[in-house]
Image (cartoon, rainbow, N blue to C red):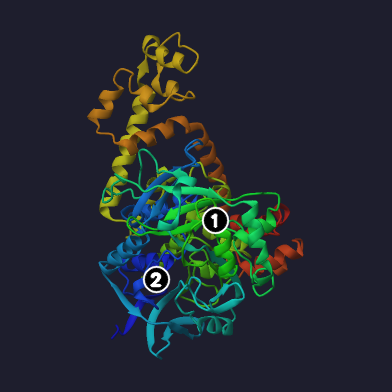
Amino acid sequence: MFENEYDVIVVGAGHAGSEAAAAAANMGSKTLLITMNLQNIAQMSCNPAMGGIAKGQIVREIDAMGGYSGLVSDTSAIQFKMLNKSKGPAMWSPRVQSDRMRFAEDWRFRLEQTPNLDFYQEMVAGLIIESHKVVGVKTSLGLEIKAKSVVLTNGTFLNGLIHIGDKNFGGGRAGERAATGITKDLVDVGFESGRMKTGTPPRVDGRSLDYSKMTEQPGDDVPSKFSFLDETKPLSKQRSCHMTYTSNEVHEILKEGFERSPMFNGRIQSIGPRYCPSIEDKINRFADKDRHQLFVEPEGWNTVEVYVNGFSTSLPEDVQFKALRSVAGFENVKFFRPGYAIEYDYFPPTQLKHTLETKLVENLYFAGQINGTTGYEEAASQGLMAGLNAALKIQEKEEFVLKRNEAYIGVLIDDLITKGTEEPYRMFTSRAEYRTLLRQDNADFRLTEKSYKLGLASENRMRKMEEKKDKSFAFVNFLKDKSVAPEDANPILEKYDSSPMKQSDKIFKIFSRPNIEMKDVRIFPGVEEFIQENELNSEMLEQTEIQVKYSGYIAKEKNNADKLNRLEDVKIPNDFNYSRIKSMSFEAREKLNKIQPTSVSQASRISGVSPNDVSVLLVYMGR
């Protein structure tokens, strides 16, 4: 039925598990993906969308590394938007509305076509751990499957409990049972566990809505895409979303159900996501607001099912229904299913190394919501890193860790293992101190070569990145060398009320001025000819414009990052005993002994470790 032993077993086939299995298998490891239901591979359990603020950057990074999330997002997209276009490129964040069924279908097909990857449908009920090393898994049918490493990506399934009003029942997702056994095995060997909650809104019948009472939200006029490869194309047609609002009347109806809400009557003790609160949470926390936005999102090209983004709730179904019927456009709404909250086990991520391997059990990796994160994108990126590091360790190769100045993925993992999380963590651009370097447009420049050297990114991906890099930088150099005369430049400058030129100057300098765009520069003599001769595409032109416009900011941030890396290079030995450093604060010693940072830079980011503590540590280490 199985191989005698796998290199990597991945437990769970959500976004983290799918990326983990793909990464390990594509790196040549014999991999088994076990899930409770093979029909639900890469299921979009919550909203039918990928990307968004900072999350879009993560999907671009996954794609640059050779993961599948960007490709699948492109093939299943029904709408594309580049968010924050009015701000600088560090803030630009791609987002797609997805066809939920196509998304899962494409993921499954891609995984089935991935060499070295086997599948099995059953619940993993426990782990086989010998001498603090994982050696396999046990299934609910009593099967024991041996493995050199195991990646746990259990999502919301570990002892999952679903709440709808005063009713609750075991489950990992609507219509699916919870997973049991793994938490006990991990706690028995010394892991600390906790409970978190998340929620989801009702799904409704789009035929029962009156869209004329809502505001249409179309996609971009010129849509882009996620993947850097030519395998996918931008959308030629798109489906619109819509927006409507709650009201005081809606809020009053919802409040009637608060006493039956598990959030307010004490039955849910765990903490929910701060940045995606339930509708009852919003009314409670933002009592001064008389309305909240609701985004009405289609679940696919052809289905009538609609996702009511912004109305996440665990209130009784009759209260949900009555309240929604008071929303403009929802007067005749019909439910497909009510919203619900779900509580599940997670393991504080300070118990992990930067590779996402656990400190307590060798060759055991955690990725996704088991680490206290929320969001498909955060989960997928952790899965990718856990899968590739599991493969590297089995192959006796050096571990792969991304730094904070190299990727949002690096920021995410460093935040988790250094600071931990007591509420579901989600990524924001504000969490990245080097976000000018970590843009969505240059994820391939940052990561593809690294991934190619690991054996994950393909030759085709590497060649495509090199061509884009060479051509865009050649164009930058051309603009630095090429001059433009006042009579050619001044008509453009006058149009933008920019100071006229009195003598010839380099195009680079003119292009650096505010409001001057690529379309203006292309009029200057010799520029269009260079573009045509070198066959520069839109990505290369965009990259050139960013390198010109933001060269000063990029250089400054790179200099700051280089300073940080000097501390990153000061490594701390394994099992370093901080208790001996009496001149360091007690809190710092306690936190450092618990987290065991690998570098002075990581130590400096731990909550409770002051700059003075870092200075003492550097002196103690002879620096």
Report which quarter residue 8 is drawn in.
bottom left
Instruction: For label 2, count other residues whose C-alpha is less than 10 Å away and answer few (under 14), some (14-19) or many (20+).
Output: many
Q: Is residue 45 left or right of residue 347?
A: left
- Where is residue 297? Give x, y as percent: 44, 54
> Which of 256 and 57 lies nearest the eye of the viewer?
256
Question: What residue sits right under mark 2 in the picture?
Answer: 13
**Residue 518 higher or lower than 284, as above or below:** above
Given this view, does label 2 or label 1 mark the residue nearer the observer?
1
Pick the quarter of the image with the N terminus.
Answer: bottom left
> Which of 135 and 537 lies nearest the eye of the viewer?
537
Amino acid identity at mark 2: Ala
Distance between mark 2 and mark 1 Cα atoms: 26 Å
Amino acid identity at mark 1: Gly
- Where is residue 436? Give x, y as percent: 51, 41
Secondary structure beneath dot 1 equals loop
**Residue 186 higher or lower than 337, as above or below:** below
Q: What residue sits 48% from the left and 23% below the top?
A: 513
- Where is residue 477? Give x, y as percent: 36, 28
Question: What residue sits right under mark 1 in the picture?
Answer: 310
Nearest to N terminus: mark 2 or mark 1: 2
- Where is residue 240? Give x, y as percent: 40, 47
**Residue 269 higher or lower than 493, as above or below:** below
